[in-house]
Image (cartoon, rainbow, N blue to C red):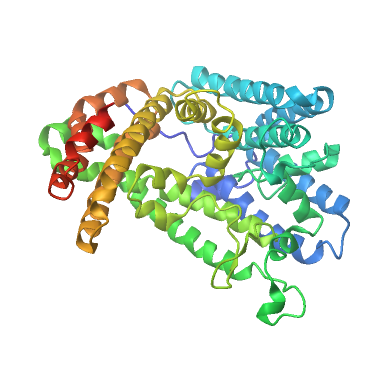
């Protein structure tokens, strides 16, 4: 049975907005979250205009970003925010005391260990319930930043021993103020995203936009000097997406709960294909809250002037350096790989940096396992990510052996894209359902009732592979090599 939502007034954070919570019937911690993000949006505009690098020193900008971030953390999480500060200070000590060859290992073990202990405490105290004041989100983002910075320090100093990207080179050990600002700034303390330390420092010092613009030859475009792109258009666009996502969350999400797919009456009276369709609908209904939170967080950073990523081929200024998702690519994904590459983008980049690129063996499996551990210790997370390993490996093998048969003509390519889109969406629905349900019992019940999904997912690919016999004489050898 799914846990009942907590009463709106239960929170360890501020109760200042309790009347609004009671009026709207929305839990107070959610009200506090939205209020802080909206206030952060206003503060970000003020920060960009009145505390710009031309008006204030880097130290003042660091201090303002840090103090407001600490205030937001205390407002939302109350005494739970101590966990954030403890983790930050422990790893500051590690960063200054550990040797460069080991700094990334010690930081990773301490940060992930502390995060995991906090996750475990939630399980034993709340028994699969939704924590009324969930401080794990900010702790997860801080863990990403701590380990990212540690890896960059290690890679930059050991560039001759380890193949590191250019953004890791020559990063000095930050001062305490720089360190606190990077980890606790008001733009990302509540909902992220994790960003590159070098980019953040360049933003504070006023070099962020110019770094990206110097890659373009502006004299050939008729400019005498570097332009000064404004984030206002990008912020307005993202706020529109945020508003639509909020409306969908308040309507669609509440009317299509994931728990209904394992309701006994629903299972007994609904045909299998209808259940499959409903699974797709409830999975879609679970997305708006992520679209809302991540897009609003992106808009906050852009409003402060952070997140500029350069210029596209059409000459349009891009503000997607910190974007956590690409909604269009998610909804039109024709492969499992394309889907996960456009979902929680900054977390995927973090996993690649700290795990996939460093894993001595089985990088895909280890990366999925780390992702599950980072999310928490709810069993549903592990069902999801272990299933994700199998789906990823199977989809990769099938795509490599099938796709080239359907590139010879436009109708074949369209047919392939349509079917692989449907199969990808079905695979995602099957994979993420345990992530939403969290507990073991509903997950096992879901698996028992949807075993046929596992067989349906590869069927279109297999059918395509059989049809390819008409286009390629080496079909038998292809099957044999793929099995080998």
Considering the image in quadrants, where does the C terminus appear? top left
Q: Is residue 20 above or below residue 461?
A: below
- The reply to whether residue 90 is in sight is no
Out of 47 and 324, give the one closest to the viewer: 324
* Residue 103 screen position, x and y as percent: 74, 25
Relative to 105, 339 lies left or right: left
46 versus 117 height, above or below: below
In this view, the residue farthest toward the bottom is 222
Q: Residue 174: x, y in percent?
A: 83, 39
Task: Please tell me whether residue 239 is drawn above or below residue 352 in the rendered image.
Answer: below
Horizontally, residue 342 falls left or right of residue 400, namely right
Closer to the camera, 77 or 113?
Answer: 113
On screen, residue 283 above or below 245:
above
Q: Position of residue 128 (x, y in %)?
A: 43, 24
Q: Nearer the viewer, residue 280 or 390?
A: 390
The quadrant in which residue 412 appears is bottom left
Seen from the viewer's position, the closer of residues 260 and 119 is: 119
């Amino acid at each position: 049975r799914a846990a009942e939502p907590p009463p709106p007034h239960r929170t360890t954070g501020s109760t200042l907005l309790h009347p609004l919570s009671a009026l709207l019937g929305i839990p107070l911690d959610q009200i506090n979250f939205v209020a802080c993000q909206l206030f952060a949006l206003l503060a970000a505009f003020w920060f960009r205009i009145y505390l710009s690098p031309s008006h204030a020193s880097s130290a003042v900008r660091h201090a303002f970003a840090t103090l407001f971030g600490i205030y937001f953390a205390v407002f939302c999480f109350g005494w739970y925010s101590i966990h954030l500060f403890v983790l930050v200070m422990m790893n500051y000590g590690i960063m200054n005391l550990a040797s460069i060859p080991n700094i990334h290992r010690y930081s990773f073990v301490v940060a992930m260990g502390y995060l995991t202990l906090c996750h475990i405490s939630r399980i034993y105290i709340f028994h699969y319930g939704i924590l009324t004041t969930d401080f794990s989100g900010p702790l997860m983002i801080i863990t990403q930043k701590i380990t990212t910075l540690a890896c960059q320090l290690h890679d930059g100093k050991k560039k001759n021993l380890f193949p590191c990207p250019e953004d890791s080179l020559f990063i000095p050990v930050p001062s305490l103020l720089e360190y606190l600002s990077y980890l606790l700034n008001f733009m990302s303390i509540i909902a992220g995203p994790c960003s590159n330390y070098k980019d953040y420092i360049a933003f504070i010092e006023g070099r962020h936009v110019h770094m990206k613009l110097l890659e373009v030859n502006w004299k050939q475009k008729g400019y005498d000097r570097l332009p000064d792109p404004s984030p206002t258009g990008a912020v307005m666009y993202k706020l529109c997406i945020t508003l639509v996502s909020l409306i969908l969350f308040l309507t669609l999400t509440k009317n299509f709960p994931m728990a209904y797919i394992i309701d006994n009456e629903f299972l007994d009276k609904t045909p299998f294909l209808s259940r499959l369709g409903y699974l797709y609908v409830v999975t879609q209904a679970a997305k708006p809250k992520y679209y809302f939170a991540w897009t609003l967080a992106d808009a906050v950073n852009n409003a402060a002037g952070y997140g500029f990523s350069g210029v596209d081929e059409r000459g349009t200024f891009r503000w997607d350096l910190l974007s956590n998702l690409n909604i269009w690519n998610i909804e039109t994904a024709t492969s499992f790989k394309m889907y996960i590459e456009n979902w929680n983008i900054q977390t995927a980049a973090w996993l690649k940096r700290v795990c996939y690129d460093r894993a001595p063996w089985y990088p895909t499996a280890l990366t999925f396992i780390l992702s599950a551990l980072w999310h928490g210790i709810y069993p549903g997370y592990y069902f999801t990510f272990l299933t994700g390993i199998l789906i990823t490996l199977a989809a990769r093998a099938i795509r490599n052996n099938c796709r080239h048969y359907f590139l010879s003509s436009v109708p074949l390519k369209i047919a392939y894209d349509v079917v692989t889109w449907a199969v990808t969406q079905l695979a995602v629905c099957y994979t993420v359902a345990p992530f939403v349900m969290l507990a073991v019992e509903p997950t096992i019940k879901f698996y028992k009732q949807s075993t046929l999904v596992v067989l349906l997912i590869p069927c279109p690919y297999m059918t395509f592979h059989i049809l390819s016999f008409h286009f390629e004489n080496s079909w038998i050898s292809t099957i044999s090599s793929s099995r080998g």
